[in-house]
Amino acid sequence: MKLFIYLLFISLISCSGKNSGIQGQRSAEEETDYFNSPSEEYPIIKNSKYSNLLSDCSRKINVSSSCYLDELPFINDQKGEDQIQKILEKTIVSRDWMGENFLFLLNKNKD
């Protein structure tokens, strides 16, 4: 259930308002080229065991070409690992601040 709540709040993280909770963080309004610059998605953890699959799997538009669960399993399917680490291993972002804010949210809501 907590995972669902975390994912639900991703849209709030991506807003990065002036009171985002991270000191020194620039708001979206302060990023002058933000909406005009091209973006490329990349894994938060660059060398995770799923980093090579994430971008490809996230761009699949039909079921017949989608990734299989044995390639990219659900986060909760891997027992015994740190929950935050498991989430971050399967997260892609288009801006560094998105990953930083998401990590901040996960750490703040561990319990």
Image (cartoon, rainbow, N blue to C red):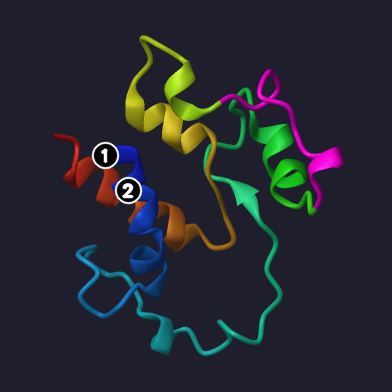
Label 1: few (<14), some (14–19) or many (≥20) C-alpha neighbours in 10 Å: few
Q: Is residue 31 left or right of residue 72?
A: left
Q: What percent of the width, then of the height, locates residue 102?
A: 36, 52
Residue tagged 2: 6
Is residue 25 in view from this perspective?
Answer: yes
Q: What percent of the width, then of the height, locates residue 65?
A: 85, 40
Q: What percent of the width, then of the height, locates residue 15?
A: 38, 74
Q: Is residue 69 magenta?
A: yes
Dominant secondary structure (helix, strand or loop) of the stretch shown in magenta: loop
Q: What percent of the width, then of the height, locates residue 51?
A: 65, 34
Q: Residue at x 78, y 49 (%)?
A: 60
Q: Is residue 54 left or right of residue 82?
A: right
- Residue positioned most to the front: 63
Q: Which amino acid, mark 2?
A: Tyr
Magenta span covers which residues?
Answer: 62-73
Q: Residue at x 70, y 61 (%)?
A: 40
Label at residue 2: 1
The quadrant the N terminus occupies is: top left
- Residue positioned most to the top: 80
